[in-house]
Amino acid sequence: MALSTENERQRFAAIGRALGDPKRLCVLETLARGERSVSELSREVGCQVPNMSQHLAVLRSAGLVDARRDRSTVYYRLADPRVLDAYRLIQTIAGSDRERTSGT
Amino acid sequence: MALSTENERQRFAAIGRALGDPKRLCVLETLARGERSVSELSREVGCQVPNMSQHLAVLRSAGLVDARRDRSTVYYRLADPRVLDAYRLIQTIAGSDRERTSGT
DNA sequence: TCATCAGTTGCGCAAGTACGCAAGCACCGA
DNA sequence: TCGGTGCTTGCGTACTTGCGCAACTGATGA
């Protein structure tokens, strides 16, 4: 593992923070099934449209999702399949932690 | 990608937030080279000992690091090698995003 | 041109977080 | 038992974040 500069770590941390909210993770799970408009996402995730727009802005500025405009509708999709790899890895870590913790 | 429950996502998000601070990422990079005491970490990362102790508490409650006590010294180490895998993946995503963004 | 629909942005509030500093606690050597 | 070292905890402050609501922008269709 190479040492990073402070700037790089700042950038990596932004991705971490983007992954640090349950609603945003729910967005990623939804987008894993295909692209969605903002209103579709807000319905499926269960929050208001302005709130969804803000979450999407966080995800986009972290580089995790991309947007495409078609007529008056904006469709979001995962920017990179590795985003899902990272999320899955986090799920695995959380899972194995639960095993160690609860003795299951 | 399977859908998660709200509780699971809360747990995954805790890991994301733990990865969402540059100093904590620096701790992970340092621990990648072997276990360290709190005072060693605070010196290498560049912050005060109480602050480091708090960051370590965040990492530990997310299940990313483990602690071991030897005499009066507490040594921390990575709880799981996959933590580094996840971090590396995040670095890769950030890196490829920079390529896309800056056109390099 | 005008009303409407899809998204974004601004604002205010409540909650959470990072940090420094001081105090507390646990362990160890003398 | 006492002083010192190593770490954790409590407290106050400044900053950030998630959210709802209202206002705004830009594209669409009559």
Image (cartoon, coloured by chain):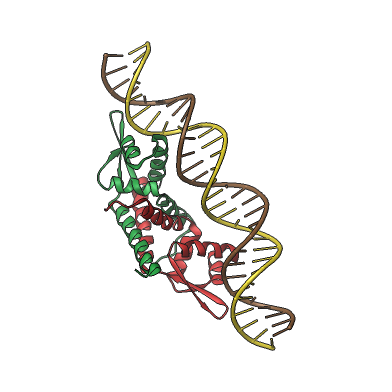
Chain colours: A green, B red, C yellow, D brown
Q: In the rendered image of this protein, does residue B17 appear above or below residue A48?
A: below
Residue situated in front as seen by the camera: B68 or A2: B68
Residue ID at (59%, 66%): B49
Res. B104 in view: no
Task: Residue A21: give x, y in percent of width and height.
Answer: 42, 49
Q: In the rendered image of this protein, does residue B40 appear above or below residue B25?
A: below
Q: In the rendered image of this protein, does residue A53 appear above or below residue A83?
A: above
Task: Residue D5: give x, y in percent of width and height.
Answer: 63, 77
Residue situated in front as seen by the camera: B17 or A42: A42
Taking the image as shown, residue A31 lies to the left or right of residue B44, namely left
Task: Residue C20: give x, y in percent of width and height.
Answer: 65, 59
Task: Residue B94: give x, y in percent of width and height.
Answer: 38, 53
Residue ID at (39%, 39%): A47
Taking the image as shown, residue D19 lies to the left or right of residue D9, namely left
Total number of numbered labels? Answer: 0
Q: In the rendered image of this protein, does residue B59 appear above or below residue A70?
A: below
Residue ID at (44%, 51%): A17
Res. A48 in view: yes
Residue situated in front as seen by the camera: C9 or C22: C22
